[in-house]
Image (cartoon, rainbow, N blue to C red):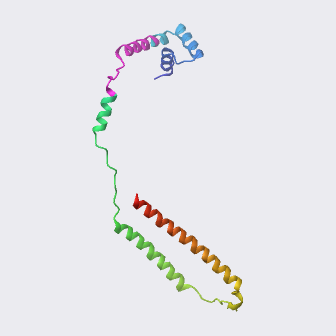
Amino acid sequence: MTKQEEQLWNYIDGFCSSAEKAEVEEKLATDQVFQQLYMQLLEVNEQLNIHLEIDEPSMSFTRNVMEQVQHQIAPITLKTKVDKKIIYAIGGFFSITLLGLLVYAFATAEYKMKVPVVSINLDIATLISPTFLMAFLFINAALLLIYLDSFLRKGMKKTQKKGE
């Protein structure tokens, strides 16, 4: 499609701006070839308007389509199976590779490191005082009561559900 044809189609369809419309009208008044092309395009446009009728679907079109869709079997989701041998082979390969690297690292390592010896003298008798022992027993007694309470509450809930 040439630029002139495009301008004329926009003019015929009414899609051009006012400046383009003035330009096309000026060309139509002065140029004979442009005017002949305009007449040809007008004839084509009239023939298209005459022969093309917009078909409307029937009133029950939507209902008929929806009924057909309901009668079709729903597609099943595709389930792919991966062979477990492949997974084991890949896992084995990586395990052997990591094991080989670990063996190589230990085989080539030099163990020339001095470990400092730490001596700790703990006197347990001084750490355990009567106050410490009483606090320890009090905390344990509180924890025991909390556990016993939760245990009994669970038992009560189970018996209430059975009774209903």
Rendered location of residue 110, percent (x, y): 59, 87
Q: Is residue 48 magenta-colored?
A: yes
Residue 131 drawn at (x, y percent): 71, 83
Q: Nearer the viewer, residue 138 or 85?
A: 138
Q: Which residues are magenta?
A: 38-61
Corner quadrant of residue 64? top left
Viewport quadrant of the C terminus: bottom left
Quarter of the rendering containing residue 37: top left
Q: Quadrant of residue 30?
A: top right
Q: Residue at x 49, y 9 (%)?
A: 32
Residue lying farthest to the top in this orientation: 29
* 105 on left or right of 85: right
Name the one closer to the observer, 24 or 153. 153
**Residue 15 on image: x %, y %:** 52, 18
Q: Position of residue 148 (x, y in %)?
A: 53, 72
Decide whether residue 116 is among the magenta residues.
no
Residue ID at (35%, 67%) = 84
Relative depth, front residue between 4 and 16: 16
Reply above or below: 102 against 78: below
Which residue is at a point 59% across and 15% down the rendered structure image? 18
